[in-house]
Amino acid sequence: MRASRRTFLQAGAAGLVFSSLPHAPAYTARSRKRAYVLVIDGCRPDELDSGLTPNLAALRDGGLRFAQAMSMPVMETIPNHVMMMTGLRPDRTGVPANSVYDRELGEVRDLDRPSDIRCETLIGRLNRRGHTTGTVLSKDYLYGVFGGRATHRWEPSPTLPITEHAPDVFTIEAALAMHEELDPNLMFVNLGDIDRFGHADLTGTTLQLARQLALADTDVQVQRFIDALKASGAWENAVVIVLADHSMDWSTPDKVISLAGPLAADPLLAGKVQIADNGGADLLYWTGPRAQRDQAIERMRAIAREQDGVLAAYARTADWLRLGPEAGDVVVFCQAGWRFSDPDPLTSNPIPGNHGHPATRAIPFFIAGGHPAVPTATVSSRVARTLDVAPTLAAFFGVGRPAGGYDGRALL
Ligand SMILES: [Zn+2]
C-alpha cells in the first residue's frame, strides 16, 4: 500500500516531499496524544445537512457538536487559520485579513510571509515541549504564512491553475503519508476544494454542481483520513477538530460595490486613500497628513455608508473589531448577497463567491476522536470560535498559555 501510494504521488503530484526541521524529537520520547485539525475551507454549516456529506455528518453527530460557531473578523482564510493556531485576536497576531495595504512597501499584498505572524503559535509551543507538528495546507498563501514553523511541512502540489490550490485528493494523500511515515502529535490540514469551487460558483446556482461535487468528494477524503487514524490506532489517543474558517455568500454582477470612485470624488480624500479588497470587506487606509486623519476617517465612513450594498463602516479602532493597525483606518462590510471590487469595479474582483462580511460568519465546528476527553453524541450550546482551537489543544497537551493568556477558550 505504501509503495503504491508513493508511486501514485510521484506520478500524480510530481513527488511527495516533506520538509522537516532538524533534530525532530525521537518517537519514543513523545506523548501518545494526537490532535488533528481539519479545516473544510469555506463550508457553510447547513451544507453538512445537505445529504452530500454523510461521513462528516456522522462524525459530527457522534462527537461534540457546537450548534453555533463563528469565524472571526475579518472572515477570511489567512486570519482565521492564524487565529486557530494562536488562540489570539488579530491585534495580537498581526494578521487581520488576507489582503492589506503594506504602508512600508506602499502596496497592497497578501499576508503570506512567515514574519507576518508576530506572536507564538501553538505549533511552536508544542515543538518547544518535545511534541512534533505537521502542516498540510492546500493553499500557497497558507503554506507561506506558516512557513517553516511545523516539524514537518508539505508544500501544496500540484496546484490547479486559476484556483491555485491543491485538490483535496492530493492534500489527503499527503496527510495520509505524513501520518504513516512521520506521525506528528499535531497535524493542521486545510482542504481547499469546497471554498475554491464556491468562489467559482457563478450565482450559487449555475455552477452549484461543482460545489456539490466538491462537498461529496471532500466528505469521502475526510473519511479516508479518519479510517487511517482508526487503522493505525492513533484514533484512540486523538482529538479531531473539524471546522471551517469562514462561510460563503454569493453575489451577481449587479451587486458589486466599488468605493474607489466615490472616495476619489471627495476633495479631502482624493489620492490619499488606499483600499485592500477582501471580498466581503474593504479595508481603507488614509495616506494623507496625520493631522487630517480623524476628519478623513469620518469622511470615509460617511461615503461608504451612502453606497448601495454597504452594511456598515467602522473605525478600525472600534473595540470589538480588535484588528490592529495592519487593517488600516476604516473597515467596511457589505450586506449579504453583495461583494466589493476595488480599486477597479470590473476587474478587481470578478468572482461571485465571497466571504469576509458578517453574512459569512457562521461555520461548522465539531470535535471528534477516540480520546476519553472527547464527549460522545453531545450538542453544546456554547458558541465556538476559530480562536478556540489553540487553547483547546494547548489544554489537551498541557503546554500552558502565552503571556497575557489566550483570547479564545478551551472547549473540552
Ligand atoms: Zn478560506
Image: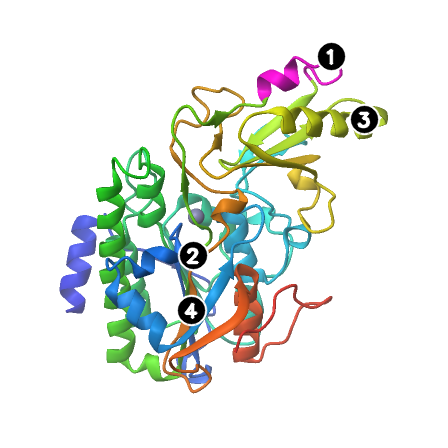
Question: Residue 352, relative to residue 174: is it above or below?
Answer: above
The label shown at residue 244 is 2
Residue 111 in percent (x, y) is at 55, 42
Answer yes or no: disc 2 within 8 Å of ligand 1: yes
Q: Residue at x 27, y 79 (%)?
A: 230
Residue beneath disc 3: 295
Residue 328 in percent (x, y) is at 68, 36
Residue 150 in percent (x, y) is at 47, 62
Q: Residue at x 42, y 69 (%)?
A: 366
In which quadrant of the rendered view does residue 293 lie? top right
Q: Is residue 304 left or right of residue 70?
A: right
Disc 2, SS: loop
Lower position in the chain sequence, tag 3 or tag 2: 2
Residue 116 in percent (x, y) is at 59, 46
Residue beneath disc 1: 267
Neighbours of disc 4 within 10 Å: few (<14), some (14-19), many (20+): many
Distance Cα–Cα, label 4 vs label 1:
51 Å
Whether pointer 3 and pointer 2 mark residues with C-beta atoms closer than 8 Å, the reply is no
Q: Give the magenta range.
A: 260-271
Lower position in the chain sequence, tag 2 or tag 1: 2
